[in-house]
Amino acid sequence: MAKLLAIKEKKQTAIKGACTLMAFEPGIIEGYLTKGHNLDEAIGLALYYGKCQQSIKVDNLVVNNGLGLMASLLIGESSPLSYHAIGTGTTTPASTDTQLTTEVSRRAITYKITSGNTVILQTYFLSALCTYNLKEGGVYGGSATATANSGTLFSHYLLTFDNSAGLSDLIFLYEVEMQP
């Protein structure tokens, strides 16, 4: 046991995450999706043709329960990251958070891929589902469902984007990287 503790003290893996919000004129992404493209391809085409109205990238905090969720995932005891939630709360994220401050909407993660030691999750919100002055977001796994605050909060972040008029469809590109 002492040997395991010594190894743990010498080598720690860091988990670093970031979220990029991309705002598009309503219908742009949906148009590409209806033509048979997956979400990643639709985003690529929209970016290529200059259809992104705004892009905001923020770092996030992987919370304590998120670390526990990762440990459970490694041995098959939990369900993967499956929902991206948005909210209007402004409380600074803390490692002890178990939910967003004020969740207002969530969507199932639409597209998942790994690239080396990075996991990339993309979630698409139609403008009608995100007509809020957004201030926070987070990713959920475990027993998460479409019900607000369900499941295990993996990460929590703050951002500012006012979509209360519903002028944009939103894509959330969430990346989590495991660093030695």
Image: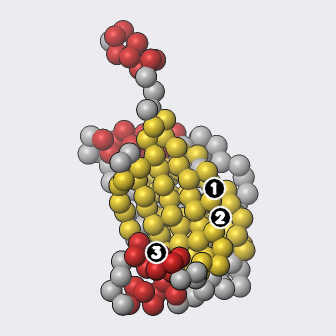
**Gap between marks 2 and 1, in whole Å?**
7 Å
- Given contact means CB atoms under 8 Å apart, are the residues at marks 2 and 1 in contact? yes
Q: Select label 3 or label 2 by which is in front.
A: 3
166 vs 9, left or right, is right
Q: Residue drawn at (65%, 64%), measured in percent from left and top?
A: 56
Q: Secondary structure at mark 2?
A: strand
Q: Quadrant of residue 63?
A: top right
161 vs 66, left or right, is right
- The residue that disc 2 covers is 56
- The residue that disc 1 covers is 58
The front one of 78 and 112 is 112
Residue 147 visible in the snapshot: no
Residue 94 visible in the snapshot: yes
Earlier residue among tags 3 and 1: 3
- The residue that disc 3 covers is 44
- Residue at the limit of the structure toward the left, as seen here: 76
Colour convention of the picture: secondary structure
Q: Quadrant of residue 111?
A: bottom left
Earlier residue among tags 3 and 2: 3
